[in-house]
């Protein structure tokens, strides 16, 4: 078969030729050493892809982690802390009622597209959001706007909350005044949210063109939010490219930045889905840092010379009880017995990374409103047993749901935490039926619907206000807890409408005391989530709100 | 031949329709929906209800199904609830990666499996035969996922010979024409990008090839052994024909018939194996996307993907039949 033979020879020759050429090129490329540790490029391994390049449309941490480097809000949190400081506004103040907010803007700030930053730009942003229509009014898209500012100029759905935003006025070039209808506990914290970061007026014009094309049926993110080019903020980096196929967002230093310039020229966020995959990529030198480090890996990584700073505590982990699912839980003595049965000290000591704290209430102690006078339920198995006996619930049996295959900042290893609590509760004579579930959507759905007698969940704060914690859970009836207690609801609500910060703090303290008196669930712990960096990296100040500024990163 | 092709293509329609009904019923039975995946820990009842309404999930199943069918006729697969982008766009973006990976895996399996199976049969009982048979047994038994982790741990993390994740090195600015990274590099003359893509393909493709490789070795071996005993081979050999002719025309050609069928079906099944392999290597193909789609109850993506896989299976079967008739002209006659 001479024809067949000669064809085969040709194919093999061609393949070898391509291989040789490619090998030659590869060795040239390797000399440049662009394998992650490049001094010009910092590569961060993110647990998930961002959803959009317009943070106003997002509500997830992975989107904000990327956009935070390019967009700035009126207020920020201090580097490495949770105190509010000036961002694009140097100073801010409100009237005593907390309804008129005046911002003195920073001067000499430029957007990435060359536009000047001023009060008109601020108002253009707020008006843009307030005038959203159609798909944008779905809370899956505009969750944070609705949380902070209520609804829109013309609500299209009767269940959309009433608008609290009233107006934005450019008093002069550098003074913007934002008015709201009612005082809100979400202000001024809300002004620091990435979802309310300021975009250039030119970008907004482009965004608005795509508003009209949004349909009411399915939620389709507009094209501008998926391709770098239109979005322009004022941050130390600008977004250059989003290569979705390669799961990679590339940013470049913005040389006209008003503040301290970024130390590393290029910043890349690469998605690596699994925790193990991120750790291995760091160990192999393919990336320079990653987030959501498993507590079990911290010691190993530190031992090998990696930087593994832990953030300050700003989250809360709790044991939830659903009173509607199990009537026995309606008895205060039963809930108290459960609280006494759990050895929280041991849980924190054995399961949480160093710096973890036992929680006494539904708020970490770093938040204003944390009270020293809440009722305590110390670990006491004998007391738990006698409380159960008193309530005639010696044979209490409960189902206990816990999530699998998930790591949350407040809940590092759910299964291990569950095992500990199970042993504690069984020691007090409570029979348990374990119900492991997949995190999303099974577990989240089950807990939200209140279909587990016991479950474990938590929360990391968006900004430093007590309502961001207790308001999330106890502002009113919620199936997750399945109880109605006017005293608790009123106490939580009172704080949320008080304009004076000092008075508000006092009201939150009262609210915490009322909640712990009633005891809807057991607050368990607050833990410091870790983040890892390469040996040759000077890490940024790590933030309790997980809001790291990568402009602070440099190579050794 | 044309009639065969047309008939098989027409068969696609009832198959896909039936499958779509089953899929809808199955998805409806799954606990949970996309709303809580979108909202995470802060999902409240009212929020979930609002999102379900926005996504049309509050409507009766037949209405949802009708809407879905209508969209299919308009060649619109809907919008992914995870990414907010048209499902079609997501597939176009990610399929090349998975196809490239699957092709590389099947290429390894065929290029190594057929010669190995042939040699094992020719030297039956020898050390090569024993090694091939026991090796293939191991290949079938080890889960692809585990093998992927093992290969990655040894060759990428410890030895540093290959990258640990992705399709291309971070920051490598390669031009994308077709989405097939290796091919694009050759097309645009960016040979370093091609090489980079190949280096990223090696470990996942090796892991993914383990089962097809094992199956092909065993099938080729068995098939060749069977053919070796046939009269025509003995006749050909006793006639004193050149050994190469006997091997190529008489033994391999006949022995390969069942192997070709197997290769076709194995290629289809690779797509499902890719789901786990891609996750281990964060490969950016359809496999890891489907995994997150399952977590997020991304119905449009799941329905679209499964329908697509069904179509691929039918088409591959068609191609296998056609290939069959090329290798063995008797098939055409019947």
Image (spheres, rainbow, N blue to C red):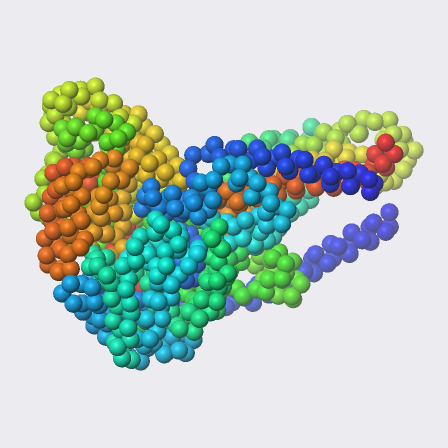
Image quadrant of residue A258?
bottom left
Q: Residue at image x 62%, y 65%?
A: B190
Quarter of the picture holding the C terminus of chain A: bottom left
Question: Residue A542 at what x, y percent from top left?
Answer: 27, 59
Q: Residue at image x 24%, y 40%?
A: A477
Q: Is residue B31 left or right of residue B243?
A: left
Image quadrant of residue A167?
bottom left
Does the rendering let one see residue B239?
yes
Q: Is residue B287 above or below residue B226?
A: below
Q: Residue at image x 70%, y 60%?
A: A17
Q: Is residue B14 above or below residue A215?
A: above
Question: Residue A481 at what x, y percent from top left?
Answer: 25, 37
Q: Looking at the image, how many numbered discs can be counted on the residues? A: 0
Q: Is residue B63 left or right of residue A107?
A: right
Q: Is residue A185 above or below residue A475?
A: below
Question: Residue A530 at what x, y percent from top left?
Answer: 29, 52
Depth check, front residue: B174 or B93: B93
Kindly give the residue lying farthest to the left in the view shown. A373
Does the rendering let one see residue B210?
no
Q: Residue at image x 53%, y 56%?
A: A245
């Amino acid at each position: 078969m001479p024809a067949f033979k000669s064809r085969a020879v040709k194919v093999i020759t061609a393949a070898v030729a391509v291989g040789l050429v490619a090998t030659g090129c590869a060795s040239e490329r390797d000399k440049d050493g662009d394998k992650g540790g490049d001094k010009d490029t910092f590569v961060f391994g993110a647990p998930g892809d961002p959803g959009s390049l317009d943070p106003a449309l997002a509500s997830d941490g992975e989107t904000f982690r990327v956009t935070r480097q390019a967009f700035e809000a009126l207020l920020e949190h201090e580097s490495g802390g949770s105190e509010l400081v000036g961002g694009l506004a140097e100073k801010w103040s409100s009237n005593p009622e907390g309804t008129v907010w005046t911002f003195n803007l920073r001067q000499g700030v430029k957007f990435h597209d060359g536009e000047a930053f001023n009060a008109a730009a601020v108002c253009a942003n707020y008006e843009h959001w307030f005038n959203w229509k159609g798909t944008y009014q779905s809370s899956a898209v505009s969750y944070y706007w609705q949380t902070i500012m209520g609804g829109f100029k013309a609500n299209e759905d009767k269940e959309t909350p009433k608008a609290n935003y009233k107006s934005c006025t450019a008093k002069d070039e550098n003074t913007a005044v934002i008015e709201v209808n009612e005082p809100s506990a979400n202000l001024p914290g809300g002004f620091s949210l990435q979802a309310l970061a300021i975009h250039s007026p030119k970008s907004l014009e482009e965004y608005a063109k795509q508003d009209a094309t949004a349909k009411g049926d399915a939620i389709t993110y507009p094209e501008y939010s998926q391709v770098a080019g239109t979005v322009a903020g004022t941050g130390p980096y600008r977004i250059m490219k989003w290569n979705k196929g390669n799961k990679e967002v590339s940013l470049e230093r913005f040389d006209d930045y008003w503040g301290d310039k970024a130390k590393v020229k290029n910043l890349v966020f690469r998605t690596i889905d699994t925790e193990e995959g991120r750790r291995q990529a760091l160990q192999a030198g393919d990336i320079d840092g990653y987030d959501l480090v498993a507590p079990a890996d911290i010691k190993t990584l530190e031992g090998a010379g990696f930087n593994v700073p832990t953030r300050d505590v700003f989250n809360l982990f709790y044991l939830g009880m659903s009173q509607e699912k199990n009537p026995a839980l309606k008895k205060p003595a039963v809930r108290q017995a459960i609280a006494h049965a759990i050895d929280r000290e041991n849980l924190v000591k054995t399961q949480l990374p160093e710096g973890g704290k036992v929680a006494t209430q539904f708020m970490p102690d770093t938040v204003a409103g944390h009270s020293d006078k809440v009722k305590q339920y110390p670990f006491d198995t004998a007391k738990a047993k006698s409380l159960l006996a008193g309530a005639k619930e010696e044979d209490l049996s409960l189902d206990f749901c816990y999530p699998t295959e998930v790591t949350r900042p407040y809940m590092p290893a759910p299964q291990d935490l569950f095992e500990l609590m199970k042993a504690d509760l069984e020691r007090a004579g409570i029979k348990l039926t374990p119900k492991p579930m997949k995190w999303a959507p099974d577990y989240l759905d089950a807990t939200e619907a209140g279909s587990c007698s016991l479950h474990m969940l938590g929360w990391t704060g968006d900004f430093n206000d007590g309502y961001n914690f207790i308001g999330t859970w106890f502002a009113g009836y919620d199936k997750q807890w399945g109880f109605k207690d006017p005293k608790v609801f009123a106490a939580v609500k009172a704080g949320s409408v008080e304009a004076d910060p000092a008075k508000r703090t006092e009201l939150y303290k009262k609210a915490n005391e009322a909640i712990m008196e009633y005891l809807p669930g057991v607050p368990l712990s607050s833990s410091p989530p870790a983040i890892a960096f390469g040996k040759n990296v000077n890490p940024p100040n790590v933030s309790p709100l997980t809001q790291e500024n990568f402009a602070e990163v440099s190579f050794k | 031949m044309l009639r065969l092709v047309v008939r098989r293509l027409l068969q696609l329609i009832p198959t896909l329709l039936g499958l779509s009904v089953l899929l809808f019923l199955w998805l409806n039975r799954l606990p949970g929906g996309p709303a809580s995946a979108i909202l995470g820990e802060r999902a409240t009842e009212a929020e979930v209800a609002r999102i379900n309404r926005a996504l049309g999930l509050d409507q009766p199943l037949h209405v949802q199904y009708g809407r879905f069918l209508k969209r299919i006729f308009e060649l619109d697969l809907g919008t992914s609830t995870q990414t907010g982008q048209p499902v079609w766009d997501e597939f176009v973006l990610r399929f090349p990666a998975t196809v490239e990976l699957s092709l590389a895996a099947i290429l390894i399996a065929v290029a190594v499996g057929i010669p190995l199976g042939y040699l094992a049969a020719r030297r039956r009982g020898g050390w090569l035969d024993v090694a091939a048979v026991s090796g293939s047994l191991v290949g079938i038994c080890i889960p692809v996922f585990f093998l992927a982790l093992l290969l990655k741990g040894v060759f990428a993390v410890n030895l540093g010979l290959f990258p640990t994740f992705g399709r291309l090195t971070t920051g490598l600015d390669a031009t994308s024409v077709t989405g097939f990274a290796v091919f694009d590099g050759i097309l645009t003359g960016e040979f370093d990008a091609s090489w980079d893509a190949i280096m990223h393909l090696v470990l996942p493709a090796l892991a993914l090839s383990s089962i097809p490789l094992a199956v092909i070795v065993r099938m080729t071996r068995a098939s060749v052994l069977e053919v070796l005993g046939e009269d025509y081979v003995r006749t050909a050999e006793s006639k004193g024909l050149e050994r190469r002719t006997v091997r190529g025309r008489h033994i391999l050609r006949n022995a390969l018939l069942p192997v070709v069928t197997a290769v076709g079906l194995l290629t289809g099944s690779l797509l499902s194996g890719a789901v786990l392999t891609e996750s281990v290597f964060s490969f950016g193909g359809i496999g890891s996307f489907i995994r997150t789609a399952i977590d997020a109850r991304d119905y449009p993506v799941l329905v679209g993907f499964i329908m697509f896989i069904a179509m691929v299976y039918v088409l591959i079967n068609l191609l296998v039949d056609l290939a069959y008739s090329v290798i063995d002209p008797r098939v055409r006659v019947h």
